[in-house]
Amino acid sequence: MRWKRFVPAEDDAFNAMVAAFKTATGTEMNVFSESFEDVQPKASVAANTGSGLDMAWGLHTLPQLFPTKVLKMNDVADYLGKKYGGWTDAAARTCKQGNDWLGIPVATIGGYMTYRKSATDKAGFKDFPKDFPGFLEMCKALKANNTPAGFALGHASGDANGWLHWVLWGHGAYTVDKDDKVSINSPETVKALEYCKALSDSFIPGVASWNDSSNNKAFLAGELYCTSNGISIYVAAKDDPSKKTCRRHLSRAVAGRPDRQADRTCSFVSRSWHSTSPNIRTRRRRLPPSCWRRRITTSGCRVRGDISPHTLNAYDNSPVWTADPKNAVFAQASKRALPASGIGTPGEKAATAIADFIVVDMFANYCTGAKDAKTAVAEAERQLKRIYR
């Protein structure tokens, strides 16, 4: 099981790899595609019942939700790490429990700022802002010109979790501290909420109900002028002759934060393959590098992943990063990333907090006026303490 593709070329490349695996090993494989929101519950059911799908391509820290139900992938992870220059830190931390690999890191979400340069230039921002105050002013100016920004505030597993953790971490706030003690109830969290509320006032209407495909559709439809996304918007525009103008004006940026350490939070966590079935134990095979290279070049900026950059260091110098200047920002995405736990320990508890959208709901409740800051933070704290008890 995997998520539904955002770019047709990636789907074609993926299916070609499945066919190559079948030819090389004689293994029959059926691929089921689900929406981001359905991957986690369906993978959890399969893992806990021991029936259904054998492998899942999951978001964030999915295998950490059921660590005793997945097969340890140490042999594959160690082989790949030694052969391809080692794993990035965030990828390894996300997919490991102690010394055991619960899954194989596939990609890191390169959730960077996607914007129409013609619109930001007109708004008076020739260079993309490098701090939070500047970013807020730019979004206000975009709204004033009727060329609004928009970021998901709904249960968008990838988009909402990614950019809202960026805002939280960028203000020096975390769900838990380095000792895994719940620390969400802090002045820094309130500052993050207040900033996000001011920012959301400049957004295109409807973001509170957005899923992971909503910003893609709005941007390509000419309704949205700045958002946070992987490379899928650009590749979709690149592949569609009718989107020539959109493609020409589309640009990328690593957005800053006050302490100038934006690169640590503009990417989020790794995605991984993990196995929930003993059928896989006798079916572990490795595709030749040529298959991976073919997938990289045919699906755009997709190094060992879907719409996201690589997690193995050997791919740092892949030609894909220089073949198109708009790919370059993604080259170091996995090295900039933090795991979903932030400064805390990746594991079942952190994975549960992500799966339950605790951070997303805290921001959404305040930004939509459903709760005041004190209540929104207190509710998030109560949920986190129940998880981390």
Image: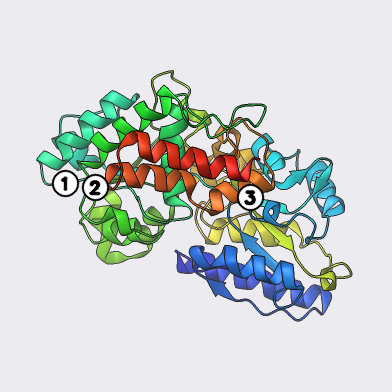
Does residue 310 appear in the picture of this structure?
Answer: no
Q: Which residue is mark 2?
A: 225
Q: Are marks 1 and 2 in contact (CB under 8 Å)?
A: yes
Q: Is residue 277 above or below residue 322?
A: below
Q: Which residue is mark 3?
A: 61
Q: Position of residue 210 (x, y in %)?
A: 34, 58
How far separated are the C-alphas under marks 3 and 1? Answer: 35 Å
**Disc 3 versus disc 1: nearer the observer:** 3
Q: Which residue is mark 1?
A: 147
Q: Is residue 365 above or below residue 298?
A: above
Q: Residues within 10 Å of mark 1 (few under 14, many from 20)?
A: many
Q: Position of residue 282 (x, y in %)?
A: 89, 70
Q: Position of residue 253 (x, y in %)?
A: 38, 36
- Type of amino acid at the residue the image marks with label 3: Thr
Q: Residue at x 24, y 57 (%)?
A: 206
Does residue 272 appear in the picture of this structure?
Answer: yes
Disc on the earlier residue, 3 or 1: 3
Q: Residues within 10 Å of mark 3 (few under 14, many from 20)?
A: many
Q: Residues within 10 Å of mark 2 (few under 14, many from 20)?
A: many
Q: Residue at x 34, y 24 (%)?
A: 131
Q: Position of residue 160 (x, y in %)?
A: 42, 49
Q: Is residue 11 above or below residue 78?
A: below
The C terminus is located in which quarter? top right
